[in-house]
Amino acid sequence: MNQFNRRDFLKGSSALMTLASFGLLGMEFKNPDGPIRTALIGAGWYGKSDLFRLIQVADIDVVGLADPDKNMLEAAGKLVSERQKSGKVPPLYENYQDLLAKEKPELVLIGSPDHWHALQAIDSIKSGAHVYLQKPISVDVIEGEAILAAARKYNRVVQIGTQRKSTPHLIQAKKEIIDTGKLGKISHAEVCCYYHMRANGNPPVQDVPDFFNYELWTGPAPLRPYDGLPHTRWWRTFMEYGNGITGDMCVHMLDTVRWMLKLGWPSQVTGTGGIFVQKEGKSNIADTQTAIFEFPELNVVWQHRTWGNPVDPEYPWAFKIYGENGMLAGSTMQADFIPYGEGEEAKHYDVVYEKEEYPEDVTEDRIELNAAPATRLHMKDWLKAIDNKTLPIADVEQGHISTASCILANISMELGGRPLKYDPKTRTVIGDPEATAKLRRPYRAPYVHPEPDQV
């Protein structure tokens, strides 16, 4: 793949100084041989959102979309034709493997449900593409190890969609509060989510519609009786396809704390919880969970409830980092430094919007306006890493650590709350064969679980 040439341009923004300090302000990426051949696997809401952000910052040609839902795929093709410069409807594929084989994209974005991430990421890497992979990167720990092994073996740049690292107000808060040592010694952090986001119901079993390949959508996961289109929140409410609220939401905030404090693997993970309140529906993910991620002289404590009120209404999905001299709270919407005692002033950081620079944001269906600038910056960082042959800010290894830590919290909860110590060198839970066996989920035939030493 040819290195990308970059052409600088400047756009006004309320976050100019922050983005300039990050080294990515005003970059539009262009390939000297023409638009960069790009494909999207998983044409649902967030996959399209990621693709539209990339279209805004790079000269790309969308050469293929893949999704087992024909209606969703055709609608996505029409939207892409309206957004990309060529105005073309890209080729549409039911099976992503056909897309990779025929179109040979240079960039692949993966926005499919979690249970497909590992196979699709590895196949894309092996096809020669650099990959933008949504979080969590995997449903089990060994899947994540295999994706990491593939990225390194084939020398591909894999950026994970943990874009808090590219969120302008959090970048600024990190530089001004954490990096300058204003908190003093940091020895505790809390991460939480209190959103009522756990889909729960009892839809009847029904016939699969002609436009939806349910067998293909299910892939390596267990084949549940079909009870309606699984898109948006329904698939996330089952452990067959994902990692529950912890895998969906904790992974973001844990990853943010790890980035801010330069933390690696936790030495020990403990998780407790279950379905304590919302027992009336089919959902099998926990509605209440606590996890402790232990680092040297520092615990990161996770809490989620999909019922009741948030502890702090200003920070319902957030992190709070506690030091001896103050506390830093942060979310997708804001951040606050609260000093202890006198000598330092409190400081507030607001979310950055770019509605004037990108007016199409305002009319895009279901867009997360607060996240759009972060995703654009994340895309620029990914392309810069490809150009410079360096690791991106949300490199696959860091995404794997954050994802696997959340999976370990779920395994601990399943095993009654006993602490787990994962060794990434041996890929085992130390002294716990039962937990080690849960690092690999069974795959449904004929799909074969990827192994790190065989990618």
Image: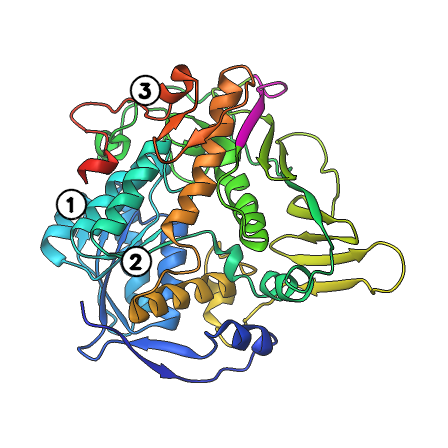
Given residues 86 and 203, the one toward you in this image is 86
Q: Is 154 in the magenta?
A: no
Q: Which residue is mark 3?
A: 225
How far apart are the two marked residues, 3 and 2, measured between alpha carbons?
38 Å
Q: Quadrant of the C terminus?
A: top left
Looking at the rendered structure, the kind of residue marked 1 is Gln
Q: What are the residue bounds of the magenta stretch?
A: 268-279
Looking at the rendered structure, the kind of residue marked 3 is Pro
Give whichever of discs 3 and 1 has the lower sequence position: 1
Given residues 133 and 343, the one toward you in this image is 343
Q: Which residue is mark 2?
A: 157
Q: Residue at x 38, y 42 (%)?
A: 137
Give whichever of discs 2 and 1 has the lower sequence position: 1
> Are there few (<14), some (14-19), or many (20+) residues within 10 Å of tag 2?
many
* Numbered disc 1: secondary structure: helix
Is the Cβ of the residue at disc 3 closer than 8 Å to that at disc 1?
no
Q: Which percent across, then down, holds residue 89?
A: 22, 63
**Quick check: 172 left or right of 75?**
right
